[in-house]
Amino acid sequence: MSLLGLPMVIGAIVLAVAVTIACVWVSGRLRGPAISQTMKRTLMVLACQVSAVLAVAVVVNQQYEFYATWDDLVGTGDGGGAVTPLTPPDHAVGPGGHTGARLRFSPFGQDGVQVATYAGPRTGIRSKVYIWLPPQYNQAAYAGKRFPVIELLPGFPGPVHNWFTMLDVTRRLRQEMAGGTSQPAILVAPTMQVRPGLDTDCTDVPGLRMETWAAEDVRTMVMTNFRARTDGSGWAAMGYSEGGFCATKLAVQHPRNYRAAVSLSGYFTPTAAIITRSPALFRSNDLMQVLRRHRPSVSLLVMGTRQDTNTALDVMRLRKVAHAPTRVFSSILPMGGHNYGVWSSMLPQAIQWISRQWSRPR
């Protein structure tokens, strides 16, 4: 059963009104001891509050499309769908260890994720960056080998470490590597919300150069401290929700630095107020306009669901403006809202696709 649409909203509102009317009617007819009447009225007040909160939750869900079905809500939905082309076509770091750049990494959670505070030389931004090295990094068979990199971008608001907690991306990558469907890769996840409450859409705005931080400073940190590939053909960006816009924008705006980008339920037109109120900033960061003027040699995978309607519509919009050598692929699931469960189900396909792009001649 769909959790979106007018019937669900009307039903929730009618239920809230009916419960309130029923409680008022019953309350005036209660009989018995005072204590019993007090307990019953308390339960009725609670019922009214629950039904009112439920109605608000349904309206908010309908507006933002977080959960599309009951399976989606309880986490039992299944991924699926196919990727369809739309356009022609030196050293290890241990827990608490130091790197050559004097960065001190500390363990974060499980599975070898580490975090350090880094100051970008180009932007002056100082914030946390999370790193994960594949098991092969320290194996003798891979001595001296440089590894490809996936840069992970978060939605807004929300911490970037949700990639390792809510989405469990390291386990997903391990599974794909074990199955032979992905190359071993370094994961890097930079903090993108460095000023509380300020949404920048990963853009260089006055006084805060977030795009340069992600595309250049973080890239320099990884290449300086780890055996990471230095050519753009060995780098990819991936993000969910606003992070999908960020990942796509980094690849489109910096094609020499990235081979590919994946958008998990992202969009392609800026929404942050600091961008939309500036015609110049909006024009230079609206990918619908940028791709009409430029044709960067990058591959883009756009993923969404038909029930998260805005993402499906944006796929069609992107299809109309992107032209070779830009390559656009899509995977639109029939079910699912705008949430971590859906994005988690998209990850195996996204990781496999990225690995194939690294293997393809540029």
Image (spheres, grey):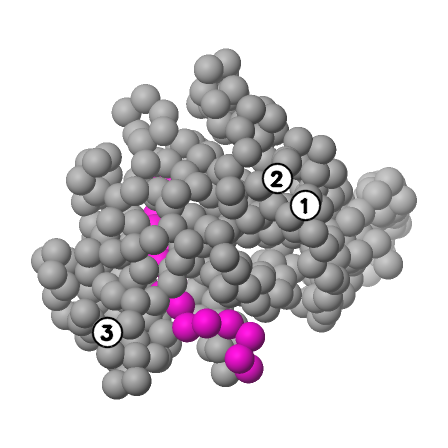
Q: Position of residue 131 (x, y in %)?
A: 31, 63
State how far apart marks 3 and 1 are (Cα).
Answer: 36 Å
x and y percent of residue 111 in the render? Answer: 37, 76
Q: Which residue is mark 2?
A: 324
Residue at (19, 45) in percent of width and height = 119
* Labels 2 and 3: the sequence-earlier one: 3
Q: Residue at x 67, y 45 (%)?
A: 88
Over which residues does the magenta segment extend?
179-194
Q: Is residue 132 left or right of residue 58?
A: left
Q: Label 3 is placed on what type of residue?
A: Gly
Secondary structure under tag 1 reads: loop
The front one of 116 and 226 is 226
Q: Nearer the viewer, mark 2 or mark 3?
A: 2
Q: Residue at x 24, y 79 (%)?
A: 143
| Identity of the residue furthest to the top in this view | 279
Q: Could you tell whether 106 is left or right of 296 in the image?
A: left
Dominant SS type (magenta): loop
Front tag of 3 and 1? 1
- On residue 144, the disc is 3
The residue under the point 82% across, 60% down is 32
